[in-house]
Image (cartoon, coloured by chain):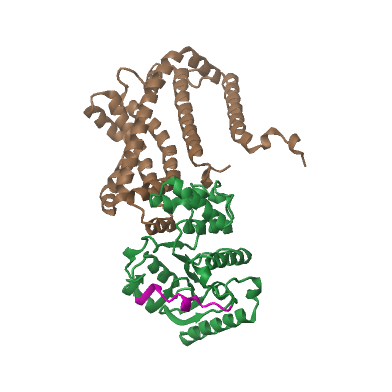
Chain colours: A brown, B green
Amino acid sequence: MNSPSKKPLLSDPRMQRIAAPLMVGAVLLLLWQALCTAFEVPVYLVPTPAAIFKTLVADWSLLAGALLVTLKITFLAFALAVIIGVAAAFLFVQSKLVEASLFPYAILLQVTPIVAIAPLIIIWVKTPIIALTICATMMALFPIISNTVLGLRSVNLGLLNLFRLNRATRWQTLVRLRIPSALPSFFGGLRISCGMSLIGAVVAEFVAGTGGTGTGLAYQILQAGFELNIPRLFAALLMITVTGVLLFGLMVTLSRMVLSRWHESEME
Amino acid sequence: MKREDTIPMDGLPEMKSERDADAVLLANQVEKTYPNGTHALDRVRLQIGRGEFVSLLGPSGCGKSTLLKMFAGLETPSAGQIRWWGGSMATVNTPGRTLAMVFQEATLMPWARVADNVRLPLDLAKLPREHSMPRVQKALDLVGLGKFGDVYPRELSGGMQMRASIARALATEPNVLLMDEPFGALDEFTRNKLDADLRALWAERDLTVVFVTHSIYEAVYLSSRVVVMAARPGRIIADVPIEGPLVRDEDFRVSAQFLGYCKQLSDLLTAANTGHAH
């Protein structure tokens, strides 16, 4: 058996979590580059990673501006989804009647394809950025509502009895019991929802064809497609993907910061 | 402590129920029938005096936990009354008439440190921190967790979590402690230790305990009185005063007196079960 000091770096689970996917990515990129070069694939079909990277650098100001627009919509939608979703969840757990009356409509929100109603919203709402934000919010809303409701309801019955026994007010029970109990599933909702708001922002812009005064990454993808500027299309796509991964990572970190001291899901 | 002046100096067997005649709790013809027709409790009559340690002993389904929850006001009887200090449940938790309950599980808030868990009932009663903190520390010291206030519940063993749960109940300085099979999930050694500590805790203060258990040994060891219950329908079949030293050590567990009570209770439970066998 190896002594701890002689252990290869990759046997450390933390290193594994970071290094292993990076190595897989590097190998795939090298393979991609090698195959494109070897078979002389034309750049308008599949550009090499090197060509994509070159375009990313050359078109940076254009793409970064587009990214900023997409990010603005994403964050606006995400923030709105959190605010509206949490408010709706609190409303739902107040009474069974309220939940029974409104929850089916929350599900409606979830099952309606956003591409089908985005054109309507874009017609109804004059300002494109607001229309796109509404579409993205609609996509991001449901995971927040359903997970927060689940969390607010999954209160330990014994603790609830203890609060009753000590004559806790509704407010005390909410703040000291229901909200902390709901945090783990609320953060689960955040993880899903942040990705959904990005997808919503991109999809809605695809449907709209424009982000208004400023154009987002989806518009760049559309435009690059028309112009057969495939490296730029890939570069824009790459930026969306990286943004999504970073957003997810941000949520994971946030959740770990809040829950690591007590919740099983976040323990090392 | 109020009780100490009444402890017999010669260490004669104790019978607190006779000594403290004033009733703390009175259950009068209490019944519980569930909507599905289950008759959980049938005409239960029980009086508990100040300073008693009463165990409700019986098999699963005899309604002992249900009865305790009714005492706590967490369930309502289908018929009959429960009187605390001669009044209704609403008079409870006024000064000198306070209840605390310990559940089957430790039911600690996982997101709060042990000290914050223990302080919870005081926080809910809006007691200022400078008054509650010393009480929390005192309660933690009493259960032997004086140094564990800053850790999270998951860092404690099952027995220590139960101790924290008891500290939370003691922090309110209750007059009556209701305990619902609190040590049922613990291993025997931990359980015996906690039983001994609980008995000592009770012996040195003015505290009335109602303790639900299905362990004959635990009931005899802890109690000044054992109320034996049977199932289908849940009812009281015997009320056995336990005489024995006030301070009970490990020797008491193997004494002829202890074993005699165990035999007596075991026979009572067996007779009740065979008498109603289907």
Of residue B242 and residue A177, the one placed in the foreground of this image is B242
Of residue A23 and residue A82, the one placed in the foreground of this image is A82
Of residue A224 and residue B43, the one placed in the foreground of this image is B43
- Taking the magenta stretch, the answer to whether it contains residue B136 is no
Observer able to see residue A228? no
Residue at 59% across / 49% down in the picture? B147
Q: Is residue A135 left or right of residue B130?
A: left
Q: Position of residue B272 (x, y in %)?
A: 48, 84
Observer able to see residue A10? yes
Q: Is residue A83 above or below residue A236?
A: below
Of residue B44 and residue A96, the one placed in the foreground of this image is B44
- Taking the magenta stretch, the answer to whether it contains residue B24 is yes
Q: Position of residue B207 (x, y in %)?
A: 48, 66
Q: Is residue B255 above or below residue A51?
A: below
Q: Which residues are magenta?
A: B12-30
Q: Position of residue B184 (x, y in %)?
A: 54, 66
Q: Is residue A178 left or right of residue B158?
A: left
Residue at 42% across / 69% down in the picture? B68
Q: Is residue B44 above or below residue A193?
A: below
